[in-house]
Image (spheres, helix red, strand yellow):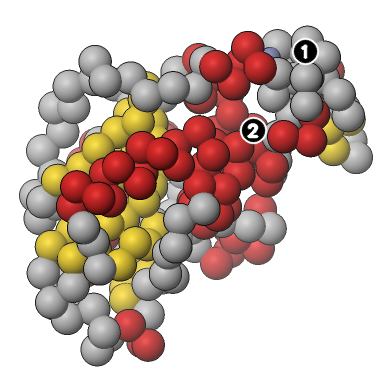
Amino acid sequence: MLGRFLSSSGLAEDRCVICGAYADDPYQGYLCGNCMDGIKRDISIRPDRKLPQVQGFRVFSRYEGVLREIIRLVKFRRVVPLARRIGKAVAEDIGEYAELVSPDIITFVPVHIFRRWGRGFDQNEEILRGAGVEFENVLVRVKYSRPLARLSKSRRTASVRGAFRVRTRWRERIHGKRVLVFDDVITTGSTAVSVAETLTGAGASSVYFYFVAYED
Ligand SMILES: [Zn+2]
C-alpha cells in the first residue's frame, strides 16, 4: 500500500506517505494535516506492564494506525524526516513528563552499531532531535539480536539481558542521577527492564521511561 508513494530514490515530493493525499506542507515530514492529526496522545491507555527497577513511565499513544505506519516507515524504510515528525508530535508531552519526574539526564535506548550502520541513523535519537529535547548518549547496545518482534516473551527477556552498558565517559557521572530514558515502542517491557538494570547497576538513583507507542 505504501510502496507506490515511495520511489527508489526516496519519497514522492508532495504526497502524504500514509494516505496519498497531496500534503499541505511536504517538507514537514511527508505527512498531510489529516494524518498528522491522527498522532495525538491517548490518555485512555492503562498500561499493565510491570517494569521492575523502573520508577515510572509514560506512554504517548497506542502502536496502531498512523503512528504504527510512521514508526515502521522510519525503521524499515529509513525515512529520517518522519522520525523528526514523531518528535514534534510528542515534544510537549515529553516536556510535561520531564517536568513531573525532573530527571538529571535524558537519554534513549540505542540500536546496536551494526543496525545503525545498516539504517544510517538511530531512530530514537532522531525522534528526540525532532522533539527539541536536550539529551545525552549514555548507553551502548552491546548485544546484537534478531528483531524482538519474532520472539516469545521469555526469549525476549533472555535476548536483551545484559544487552546494554553505560558508556565509559558516563561511568562516574551516572552515580546518584535520575535518568529519563526514551524508547519508541514498548511491547513486553523486557528492553526497558534490561536498561533499568544497567543504569541502576551503574549507580543511577532512579530510572523513568517515556514511550511513544504502547503495543497491546
Ligand atoms: Zn495523509
Q: Amino acid at mark 1?
A: Gly
Q: Give percent across and percent down for residue 213.
A: 38, 31
- Mark 1, residue position: 20
Earlier-in-chain disc, 2 versus 1: 1
- Mark 2, residue position: 73
> In percent of the image, x 70 and y 34: which residue is there?
29
Picture quarter with the C terminus? top left
Q: Give percent across and percent down for residue 30.
A: 74, 29
Is residue 113 at least partly visible in the picture?
A: yes
Question: Residue 141 appears in which quarter of the rendering?
Answer: bottom left
Above or below, 62 relative to 1 = below
Element assignment for label 1 = loop
Residue 155 left/right relative to 75: left
Picture quarter with the N terminus? top right
> In percent of the image, x 82 and y 14: which residue is there?
22
Q: Is mark 1 within 8 Å of ligand 1?
A: yes
Q: Residues within 10 Å of mark 2 (few under 14, many from 20)?
A: some
Q: Amino acid at mark 2?
A: Leu
